[in-house]
Amino acid sequence: MNTELLKFILDFIARSFYPAMAAVLLYAVYPKIQEVDVRALTNRLTSATVAGAAFTFGDAEKVGAETAPLNRQMVALERQVQSLQTQLSQALPPTAAVSPKPAPDTAKAKAEQDKLWRANAAYTTLVFHSASSRAPSAKVTQALLNAGFTASDTETDFNELQKVEPKPGTAFITYTTSGAQVLDDIRAKIMALGVVKEVNVNPRTIALKRGDVQVLVF
């Protein structure tokens, strides 16, 4: 199913129907919804390069800032499809397989997670890597997108770096005053992945040209 068509259907259902009518319509499109490979939506994330070569760091910033919102939209669509699939499975006739309803505590925790996911959209996190650190960088970017951040993954040669040593197996984070509010959370998420040996943080805020937080994966 075309992703734009699917998004239109989801938005149309959410805005135009009362619950009872929506259930009927959702049931009608259920087979098509079930055919959607939600993981494939976000697996399209690839590192941006130009003609197979890395961008200069200045160009990488521009490209990263442009692709980050698109990446988050894809993850948002994935979450929307997953939510709809869950609702559909619970709304099916008794003869069909029905997923158990979540416990109150679970529902509350999910609501809090969804609230945080929406709040993180306000922060653009640009991830940069060299050719040798593409794999760990992709995992970092995906983790940030899954947490709700507007994030991108761009390859660069790092030749313009002056005060940061590109030590293999490490990551370095720079951030603006706004980005400082989510700095600890982002650092913790990167450390939890175990894809780098250490995560170093700039000691003070910087007036970055692009993004609220920049993560350099070496």
Image: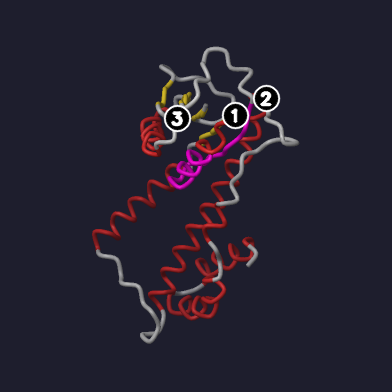
Query: Which x, y percent locates residue 169?
Result: 47, 27
Residue identified by numbered label 1: 130
Q: Identity of the amino acid at label 1?
A: Ser
Say whether residue 214 is visible: no
- Camera-nearest label, 1 or 3: 1
Q: Nearer the viewer, residue 71 or 22?
A: 71
How crowded is the residue under tag 2: few (<14 C-alpha within 10 Å), some, or many (20+)? Answer: some
Identify the residue at horizontal 40%, vertical 26% (top origin).
198
Amino acid at pointer 2: Thr
Q: Residues within 10 Å of mark 1 (few under 14, many from 20)?
A: many
In the structure shown, which secondary structural element does the residue marked by tag 3 occupy? Answer: helix
Q: Which residue is mark 3?
A: 179
Q: Secondary structure at mark 1?
A: loop
Residue drawn at 29 percent across, 66 percent down: 102
Q: Earlier in the sequence, mark 1 or mark 3?
A: 1
Where residue 109 appears, as percent x and y from the top left, is: 29, 54
The first of marks 3 and 2 along the sequence is 2
Q: Which residue is mark 2?
A: 56
| Bounds of the magenta segment | 138-156
Indicate yes or no whether the magenta region holds residue 146. Answer: yes
Looking at the rendered image, the quarter that the N terminus falls into is: bottom right
Q: Is residue 204 magenta?
A: no
The answer to whether 157 appears left or right of 42 in the picture is: right
Left or right: 182 as drawn, with respect to 153: left
